Amino acid sequence: MYQIYCRAFQKMMKFASVFLPWRKPELIKGEGCLKKLPELLVDCNITRVLIVTDQGIRSTGLLNDLLLRLSEKKVHYIVFDRTVPNPTIDNIEEALDIYYQHNCKGLIGFGGGSSMDCAKGVAARVARPDKSISQLRGLQKVRRRTPMLIAVPTTAGTGSEATLAAVIVDSETNEKYPINDFQLIPNYAVLDPLLTKNLPASITASTGMDALTHAVEAYIGKSNTEETRKYCKQAVKLIFHNLHQAYQDGSNMRARKNMQIASYYAGIAFTRAYVGNIHAIAHTLGGFYSTPHGLANAVIMPYVLEYYGEKVYKPLAELSDTIGLCNKSDTDKQKAECFIRELRKMNKAMGIPDKISGIKESDIPIMAQRAMKEANPLYPVPMIFSLADFKCIYYFIKE
């Protein structure tokens, strides 16, 4: 009965999605395109802006040219650089206070997924000052216009620049959960590959595998559309052909540019078609142990795909054909197994481990419960996991 309920809910959501106000951010892309941002703000009459980033990004100097150009255009800015990996409610409230103190009218999320999620959290609170972050959890709880939101990713993986989701951690309970609302889709996404040039190889690897997880989970799910399938295939192809090049040679701008586009495509796909059990598990690891999200997804993905078994043979075979992994004459099962083996090879080639260290056995029951709560009934996964299924995966990935 539980599975029937979940599937009925997912079918209802898929039917309703046809009538929802889907949109994409306006895209600004290409080497050096960040230079266009100050003039864009002026054109939009945004003269006071909060830039949400982290101390690591601030220390690299990536912001310096933008700040200089903002000053030249007489755009008042204030930088909030205290975003933590897996941003917390406290993070958002602190940034929100600064937003109000400086009478800001717009937001720039500058950095990885954490900075963009934190900026989205601030945008949600500005739109709904009557609601706490915990009250905005779930689907369509904002429903009011947010300030102008511009996403400037400095990694190629999270896809947050294209999505309606902000993923937040409650630091008191260690629970990590999403706020999903169309109002949180950024107004503009700035894809400047120069911002990713000096990204550490390990971050390039994990964020790239994060993007691949988005594309794979969106493709194998039951709520995809012709458009999302197209974006998933394009993303998978770009990642398989460019991620290792970007990992080996960070100065390869062609690979960097292609990875940014792949991340964006995957973001568009999963914001419409959803993610799945891989993400539900990864979110708990981020909440409990601050495990980097991309790293968690990369490790978990092969185990979950294997666990799905024949339920994903056909879609994984199609993805395998898209990148030319196997012989055309191979069976769907052979192609799917080949695809999963290739994921493990990619992880190994980029120094990503095949287990997660630090998982406490005593934490597994509550993490499994939270993963199940996130996934069901919302995520249209190939196989609805029970509590026992989730526990199995934690034991598989536990070092």
Image (cartoon, rainbow, N blue to C red):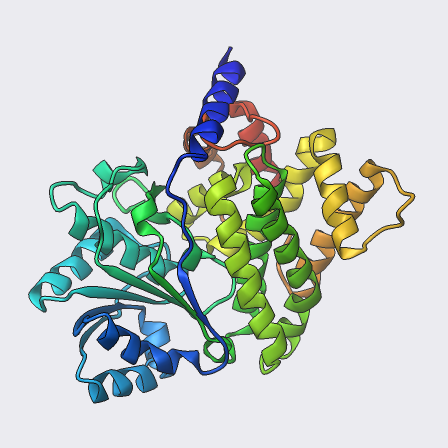
| Tally of marks | 0
Residue lying at 89% horizontally and 42% vertically, measured from the top left: 330
Looking at the image, residue 322 sits to the left or right of residue 381; the answer is right
Using the image, determine if residue 63 lies above or below residue 393. Answer: below
Using the image, determine if residue 191 lies above or below residue 229. Answer: below
Residue 382 lies in what quarter of the image?
top right
Residue 150 lies in what quarter of the image?
bottom left
Using the image, determine if residue 148 lies above or below residue 36. Answer: above
Residue lying at 50% horizontally and 77% vertically, measured from the top left: 30
Toward the viewer: 104 or 117? Answer: 104
Residue lying at 19% horizontally and 61% vertically, measured from the top left: 95
Looking at the image, residue 262 sits to the left or right of residue 372; the answer is right
Q: Can residue 372 be seen in this view?
A: no
Q: Can residue 157 be seen in this view?
A: yes
Looking at the image, residue 177 sits to the left or right of residue 1; the answer is left
Residue lying at 33% horizontally and 80% vertically, measured from the top left: 63
The spot of residue 99 in percent (x, y) is 14, 63
The spot of residue 321 in percent (x, y) is 79, 49
Toward the viewer: 165 or 36? Answer: 36
Residue, far top = 1
Toward the viewer: 104 or 101? Answer: 104
The spot of residue 358 in percent (x, y) is 49, 49
The spot of residue 246 in percent (x, y) is 62, 73
